[in-house]
Image: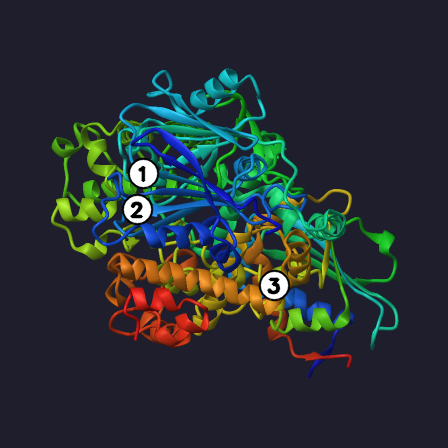
Amino acid sequence: MDGYWGKILVADLGTGRLFDEPLNEKYARDFLGSTGLAARYLYDLVDEKTDPLGPENPLILMPGLLNGTSGPSVSRWGGAAKSPLTGHYGDANAGALFGAELKRAGYDGIILKGQSTTPVYIYVKDGVATLKDAGGLWGKDTYKTQEAIKKECKDKRTQIACIGSASENLVPYGNIMSEYGHSLGRAGLGCVMGSKQVKAIACRGRMKLPMQDSERFRKFARKAMKEVKEAFLSQWMHEGGTASWVDSAISYGDGPTKYYTAPTMAEATKISGVTMAEKYETGHTACFGCPIRCRKVLRIQEGKYKYESVEGPEYETVIALGAMMGLDLDMSSIVYLNELCNGYGFDTISGGASAGYAFYLYDMGIISDKDTGGLKLTWGNVDAAIALLDLIGKKEGFGAIVAEGTKRMARRYGRPAGEAVQTKGLEIPMHDPRAYHSMGLAYATSPRGADHNKSDGYQVDGGVGHPDLGLNADDRWGDKKAAMVEKSQNYRALTDSIGICHFAMIPFTLIVDMINAYTDWDTDIDQLLKAGERVFQLQRALSCKLGITSKDDVLPELIMRPIQEGGQEGHVPNMEKMLPEYYALRDWDSATGKPSKERLEGLGMSEIAASIDAK
Amino acid sequence: MAAKFGTQEWYDIYKEEINNSKAYEEAAKTWEGDFYFITKKGGPVKEPIVGYVDLWHGKCRKAEVVTDMKKYNPEFIIEAPYAIWKRICLKQLDSTQALITKQSKLMTGSRGTMAKIMRYTKAANELTNITARIDTEWLD
């Protein structure tokens, strides 16, 4: 089948055996790649009894369908496993170069099974995979690990996905880092990798992709490249990066502050993408084949921490490690905090939100210096925040408690469940649903738990819509959001599986053209949109298989408290109205939360319907 | 009585409404910059309509229809066909979405930067809240 190598690398870590397994072509055709295809493989391998940190939980990493091609901004790759943070379905995706390199190394994906008894890393080069000792790498931070492996391979172009000591220490939201600061961030996939004692996967590929019609592909890719280069959003993202959203977040009350209890702090503008561009930027870096080049390279010569050349933090990090704890940061400090988390290798969203919750509990008098080991977690205490994040990375002292995430923290301290701002155990990202009501619905219904990337709600109502899909800007506080959220979730399930970046405005017809030229398919817009829905409903069914029901589709109580001041102006999402409308569109059972048998069968998933006993 | 779109009378009202808007003043309290809003030739617009608007610290210092583009050197220029301006002014089309979907075009003149304008998306929306309130006689 063109577009795929037809093989998956399986690493049986218990025996140390690496072998190739034929790609399930039906799965590939139906679920494309990245998080879509990974979820389909995962479905067969886990159930409610699977211990997320046991040998039976696989870690599946897949390139996006178009990874490695000359299509513009098609670098996104992804992974899936049962999450050690949430206890159910977990996935994450990232950009940079790893997905393309894995594909060019001759594989359609990697499945890690079992557990090694000693630290190892997997080296894949041009279709050949070997298991290597990582004893000397264990304990190293993610940056040093990448450098050491590149040196060992004697090839700087080797791409590495690795874990840091947070995941070695089994921090449940430990992540997988690649190309230095790019993160496969959420749901604790790095922690699963750590449980297997796999320090890294290194790939180098120079193989010609299995493309059906290279000339035709190049023609469409060139057109798509022109579209992306000329798009206003590309210029915007190049200029400001994701952190350029900070200033809008301040205006609209989108950036959670003091653990969701205060208006977005205006001081965050000092560490926004715009400020980076105006005062600190020396250049940009890009993901594979991306003309946008949204990542910033900064030079910081003022403040406590100085950097000659360092990557600028993303929007989520800027808010999660700043306003969330009420920190009035300068650029030097936010970069330091970002580097600290990246070096340890843990998710800045869950990490920042969990630290923010600790500050909240301290402020409320629920915990004291006795609990924190002397850390004075008063809003705005930068030194305490640094010390706490450091302890999380080491999983030591009070940091070991905060490393468990907000849901477990609330339980430990006997607090109401609705005080922990998460859905299904995953901390809510830095787009406040009181600023954009659609995000409330997106967070409540995303298969892995709160997920800002599975829906474009804040982007659509912020003006970055998709008119060709009927996704147009509307009242951000409106409650007729069910259709928009459903459509955008399907669309993102699709583009994630293909590997397309959210910021690449490629006309849908060109996406179809590129896929048809790459593969031997004769697909069209309707089929692809259906594939997007198939992926999303599969991920939902997998969540249900692992114990999620309609009772879990709720927003926490704390985030439903209105904030009158600032950009939210006292609004809260009307979940009672939106959720039933959404359920009707999805055809989900109101009691069990399961997709209907008819809907699953209509999407070609009879076996999934039978597996979860869908009605 | 309705003011005809693109006339000096319309821009006078626009200026007055901006200066009466507390929401705009709050959103743009630190903004310093000027614009040409250009309505392209086409449809009922026989010659391009160019409106110069100078915005400063939440207030409008000048709103003027100009016939000679050389008269000012604004930081930003936004250009769109009449039908698009009408939809933006009536809040039927989000101003950012118009840019993203290439229905309008932003140019940064010789002095402006994209970075500067990124800080003020809410102020831009408040400007369209204001245009939606103006009793406008449309050209079509």
| A477 shown above or below A69 | below
Question: Quarter of the image containing the C terminus of chain A?
Answer: bottom left
Q: CA distance from mark 3 to mark 1?
A: 50 Å
Position of residue A268 measured from the top left corner of the image (x, y, whole percent)? 45, 41
Q: Chain of mark 1?
A: A
Choose between A289 and B50: the one closer to the eye: A289
Q: Residue at x 58, y 69 (%)?
A: A526
Labels 3 and 2 within one chain: no
Q: Residue at x 32, y 26 (%)?
A: A165
Tell how many labels: 3
Q: CA distance from mark 2 to mark 1?
A: 8 Å
Residue underneath mark 1: A192
Position of residue A221 measured from the top left corner of the image (x, y, whole percent)? 71, 49
| A261 shown above or below A241 | below
The three-letter code of the residue at mark 1 reads Val
Position of residue B26 measured from the top left corner of the image (x, y, whole percent)? 51, 56
Quadrant assignment, res A359: top left
Q: Residue at x 57, y 41 (%)?
A: A274
Query: Crowding near pointer 3: few (<14 within 10 Å), some, many (20+)?
Result: many
Q: Chain of mark 2?
A: A
The three-letter code of the residue at mark 2 reads Ser
Q: Which mark is residue B127?
A: 3
The three-letter code of the residue at mark 3 reads Leu
SS state under label 2:
loop
Q: Chain of mark 3?
A: B
Q: Do labels 2 and 1 touch, CB within 8 Å? A: yes
